[in-house]
Image: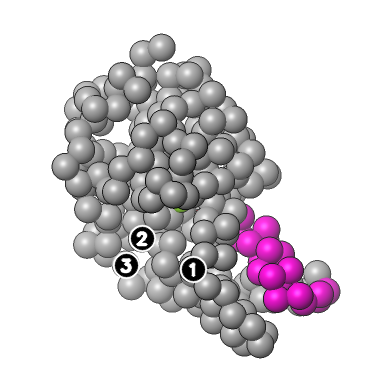
């Protein structure tokens, strides 16, 4: 089927906020008396804030009340936003701006499919919000990736069938979500993690839109 739309994950695909999430969660875990490493952090990518918190608490063998969980999540988000607020267009990952511009010129529609509730702020900070035809994020979905909800809603809001969309993802769970929606998946990062993607690239740098239209 002809490709009509690109659905982009945000954190780790358009901008390197994945590292900010990691730093803020690590700070929280350390405050609770344990640590998280990069390997464990891979399992958090693409997962909603509260699901991430629950996974981290399980990792540290901690059981706390729902009220304490909300407090920890709010503090983590405040620490995260402090890092996000330092961002400028210079933080857009290499090759992304020209790739988005080329997609628009080629008539391919662009949507965001992110688990984050902070996506509007981030897109504004880095100045790419006007390039998106639709934004679906953690404020519109109830099920975390690997559930396909976020991408299915993205395709729906553009008015296209799932099969005519390509998803760009840095997370194992995100690639699973794309596949569950019958979409093609381009992995951004390591093929050791993203082995279920149709193709894996290191970054957008040096890649053109036409390469993906026949996936
Ligand atoms: C995803 C990130 O994009 O958004 C996760 O990969 C993050 O690490 C999730 O937990 C939720 O983000 P936020 O900004 O709503 O806490
Ligand atoms: Mg991501």
Give SS at disc 2. Answer: loop
Q: CA distance from mark 1 to mark 3?
A: 23 Å
Give SS at disc 1. Answer: helix
Reply yes or no: does residue 92 show up in magenta. Answer: no
Q: Residue at x 20, y 38 (%)?
A: 207
Tag nearer the camera, 3 or 2: 2
Q: Residue at x 52, y 33 (%)?
A: 178
Can I make out residue 111 in this image? no
Residue 38: which numbered mark, if any?
A: 1
Q: CA distance from mark 2 to mark 1?
A: 15 Å
Give the position of the C terminus as an image quadrant.
Answer: top left
The spot of residue 214 in percent (x, y) is 31, 19
Residue 74 shown left or right of residue 192 in the figure: right
The spot of residue 7 in percent (x, y) is 42, 35
Q: Which residue is mark 2?
A: 16
The spot of residue 137 in percent (x, y) is 53, 46
Q: Which residue is mark 3?
A: 87
Colour convention: one colour
């Amino acid at each position: 089927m002809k490709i009509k739309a690109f659905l982009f994950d945000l954190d780790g695909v358009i901008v390197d906020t994945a590292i900010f999430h990691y730093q803020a969660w690590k700070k929280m875990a350390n405050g609770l008396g344990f640590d998280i490493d990069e390997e464990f952090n891979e399992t958090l990518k693409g997962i909603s804030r509260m699901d991430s918190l629950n996974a981290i608490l399980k990792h540290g063998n901690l059981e706390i009340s729902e009220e304490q969980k909300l407090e920890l999540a709010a503090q983590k988000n405040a620490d995260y936003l402090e890092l996000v607020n330092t961002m400028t267009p210079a933080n857009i990952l290499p090759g992304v701006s020209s790739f988005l511009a080329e997609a628009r010129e080629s008539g391919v529609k662009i949507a965001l499919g992110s688990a984050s509730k902070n996506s509007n702020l981030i897109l504004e900070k880095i100045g790419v919000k006007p390039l998106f035809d639709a934004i679906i994020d953690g404020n519109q979905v109830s099920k975390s990736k690997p559930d396909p909800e976020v991408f299915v809603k993205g395709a729906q809001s553009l008015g296209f069938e799932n099969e005519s969309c390509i998803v760009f993802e840095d997370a194992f769970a995100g690639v699973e979500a794309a596949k569950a929606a019958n979409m093609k998946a381009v992995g951004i990062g390591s093929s050791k993690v993203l082995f279920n993607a149709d193709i894996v690239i290191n970054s957008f740098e040096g890649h053109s839109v036409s390469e993906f239209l026949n996936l």
